[in-house]
Amino acid sequence: MPNRLTRRQTLAALGAALGAPALLGRAGPAFAQGARPQLVMPPLLEGALAEGRRVYDLAVAAGETEFFPGEKTATIGLNQSYLGPILKVRKGDAVRMNVANGLGEPMTLHWHGLNLPAATDGGPHQVIAPASTWSPEFEMRERAGTYWYHGHMMHRTGAHVWAGMAGMIRVEDAEADALPLPSTHGEDDFTLVLQDRRFTRDFQMPYELSMHDAMAGIAGDTALVNGLIAPFMEVPAGRIRLRLLNGSNASFYNLRFSDGRRFWQVASDGGLLPAPVELAEAILAPGERAEIVVDCDDGAAVSLLADVFSAEVRMMGGRGTADFLELRPRGATRAAGVMTDKLLDLPEPEASATTRRFVLEMGGMGMGRGMMGGGFAINGKAMDPQRIDEVVPVNTTETWVIENPTPMFHPFHIHNTQFRILDRSGQKPGPHEAGLKDTVVVAPGESVSVQVRFADFTDPDRPYMYHCHILEHEDGGMMGQFTVV
């Protein structure tokens, strides 16, 4: 994170100025205090082998989900009523994704973090009409790691993700298999989608934006993990691994444990870090992932908490503390042993001859547009699907500089690449950002330089996207597109 300590101190100061934080996660209409449901892992979908490809069938449809006992909430899900399965894939697999649109409206499904041909990216140009199926085919080229998929329909991304159109991708490879890390899905290796939602008195969560929501992004007062409100999870009394996604529309989560215990971050967006990083807290912006390893060998129950903040910390500050999940160790305690000191060899970033600048802008910053009419742009231009903003030569290393003169934090996502962070306003990033990334937070007044390279695919007609991953900013125009030629 940019000048990590400074940013954390800023958030803490804002929290103090606002008074005691409210508790998210146990709120909501008629939610029984103290009655935690047991966490359920999303189904693990390994695909079926057909003609040398691993085929995954995903049926997108509207449904009803029982977030509160006995009450039905209208949602969207993939193969279920809310969210979707975990797609288990190995590096090098040839895959086909059969995405069936059972909604009564057009949609897309984007493979977030993956390097793949533009025609299969699932951005705003790969629209799936109602009652039709889209079947992209591509090779899994990413290292072992935690990736995800979500709706990416033009002007409807926020609404679709809010309703539940998202799921996780677990990529495995031989290099990661050989490491002494917890890796058995559902036993000592757990995948967690962290979100917040707001519910009406009749237990619905409509996507209805106020002017403030359109400006700062929509957020809720109820914390969800895998679609459950403040659940508990039984874990072994030893060392466990948590694969974390900030799947919110707009909220930033400063994650920590209730007893202050330390943990190791072992991976970020694009897979393993060069070495474990010992932390007491980890900040995740919308779209970011982290894999952490924590010792539960003391047998004591502990909660995963998050101080929740909006993008507009200079204006509004903290939203409260989310009580996401209680871990309840079971069985005989097991000594965890020494954490490995090395995970992955990553080469040093290369020198680049080309630099591109991307200035993030919003209404009131010299644009002259109202927030509700869009009000967001990059380099003075709001998103236009008919315009190609950048043309990038294939197999060329470039430096992209993202500048943020706005008063909000913006998580900047680039499709079809895992990049390296070079510096934050001239300062070297921390070790937790030393790995591969596809989303990077740019603080107010900050300039972040990243190294990108598009080595594999060209298409002069079909573009990829770059955008803010606060979904209301993306839908409101803070998105551009580029082709690789």
Image (cartoon, grey):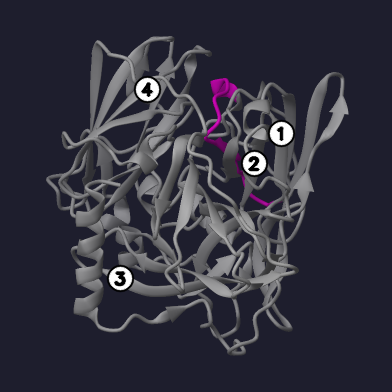
Q: What residue type is labelled 3?
A: Gly
Contact flag, marks 2 and 4 (Cβ < 8 Å): no
Say which element carries label 3: strand
Q: Which amino acid does label 1 sit on?
A: Val
Q: What residue type is labelled 4?
A: Val
Q: Earlier in the sequence, mark 3 or mark 1?
A: 1
Q: Is residue 194 above or below residue 460?
A: below
Which quadrant would residue 295 be assigned to in this image? bottom right
Within the magenta stretch, is there residue 112?
A: yes
Stretch of the chain drawn in magenta = 103-119
Can you identify the residue that label 1 sits on? 89
Can you identify the residue that label 2 sits on? 169
Residue 276 locus on image (x, y percent):
46, 42
What residue is shown at x 23% (from left), y 19% (from top)?
Answer: 355
Can you identify the residue that label 3 sits on? 318
Contact flag, marks 3 and 2 (Cβ < 8 Å): no
Dominant secondary structure (helix, strand or loop) of the stretch shown in magenta: loop
Within the magenta stretch, is there residue 116?
A: yes
Left or right of residue 47: residue 434? left
